[in-house]
Amino acid sequence: MRRTVMAVAASTLTLSLSACGALNVSGSSASSASPSKGNDVTVGLLLPEKANTRYEQFDYPIIKKKVASLTDGQGRVDYANADQDADRQASQMQRMIDDKVDIILLDAVDAKAIAAQVTKAKAAGIPVIAYDRLAEGPIDAYVSFDNELVGEVQGRSLLDALGQGSHTSAKIVMMNGSPTDPNAKQFKAGALSELSGKVTIARSYDTADWKPGNAEANMTTAIEALGKDGIAGVYSANDGMAGGIVKALEKAGVTELPPITGQDAELPAVRRIVTGEQYMSVYKSYPQEAEAAAQMAVAKVQGHDIQFDALTQDSVDSPTAKDIPAQLLTVTALTKKNIKSTVVADGIYTVSQICSGAYKTDCAAIGLD
């Protein structure tokens, strides 16, 4: 079951741990090791930003609820969001170290810059689990999605949208994520593995801080260089940037938008998919990731080694550490065809949330009513 994924070039295997029951491991392994901590655990949770709505809307509340359920209501989550400020996150993590939390779940703003704080946590005897993004330093485990697979799914979807008649002369704009986020490098590598040699990458941008405004500015520059009718498709690494890209295209007078990719299945993006402004998003089951992180954290603190090992049957390498125990989850391409069977079925959004107001007609047209 164990596989190795490099920090910049992830494995393209698509094995799902949930199929092996890794997400449904019970606490029955407790008898195999003497717990080092009871139910009164404190999990430090450091999330990177608020521009992407998933962190405050899904990740934090799900982790908080799962920690409570795993500890008979006695465990607590000490939460801080850095709002895309690496120095602020370092201060937040130092405060958690000083407060002697039992374990830290870290979603790094800057994976390299935070390594010093990870080392300090290690010295203080506080385990650190990298959450969603692979941080550098002596981390104890990692839980995320198969990030290169995300890029591959985006790239394949964009090619599908372009159709069989497309060829290498089709000009594509790539709007990649933040250069300080190791996940962005993996998404880009996965997308290029599908797109290279099949289309022309006419412009490519690494978008500072993942900000939609920066993506909009980059897209405006690309339109000025290529012409408003000279862009066959846009690879956008996430939904927030896709929204900025749509704004730039519409401001330039583009009436028939090219296919645009995304990631995170944010509600505005799902609605853009319904209306046809965005072709697809990558749906990642945040409840699955968040619950897995909570399970790993509590198992680690309580000394349930068999349970922890069952939850980390993959391994990854970072620039500073090798063979880090990991859990890598698979993803789904979200299009008009499967909104109901993904985000609606999983309880992320209701049909009424997606299809309110001006969206009712478009929803009805695709059977989402």
Image (cartoon, rainbow, N blue to C red):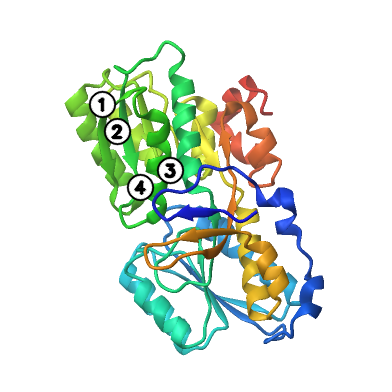
For the residues labelled 2 and 4, the Cα–Cα distance comes to 17 Å
Residue 252: x and y in percent read 26, 26
Determine the residue positioned at 66% across, 38% down: 342
Q: Are marks 2 and 4 in contact (CB under 8 Å)?
A: no
Taking depth in this image into account, of 339 and 19 the one nearest to the observer is 19
**In the displayed structure, does residue 148 sit left or right of residue 112?**
right
Of the numbered discs 2 and 4, the one sitting upstream in the chain is: 4
Q: Can residue 186 be seen in this view?
A: yes
* Residue 211 to residue 83: above or below: above
Instruction: Name the amino acid, label 2.
Output: Ala
Taking depth in this image into account, of 325 and 126 the one nearest to the observer is 325
Of the numbered discs 3 and 1, the one sitting upstream in the chain is: 3
Q: Are marks 2 and 1 in contact (CB under 8 Å)?
A: yes
Determine the residue positioned at 24% across, 40% down: 217
Determine the residue positioned at 35% across, 50% down: 210
Taking depth in this image into account, of 159 and 41 the one nearest to the observer is 159
Q: Is residue 278 visible?
A: no
Pair 2/3: label in front: 3
SS label for mark 3: loop
Taking depth in this image into account, of 177 and 255 the one nearest to the observer is 177
* Residue 200 to residue 149: above or below: above
Q: For mark 3, does the 10 Å Cα neighbourhood hold few (<14), some (14 to 19), or many (20 or more) residues?
A: many
Residue under label 1: 252
Instruction: Name the amino acid, label 3.
Output: Asn
Query: Which label belongs to residue 177?
Result: 4
Of the numbered discs 2 and 3, the one sitting upstream in the chain is: 3
Residue under label 2: 248
Q: Do the residues labelled 4 and 3 touch (CB within 8 Å)?
A: yes
Query: Which label belongs to residue 238?
Result: 3
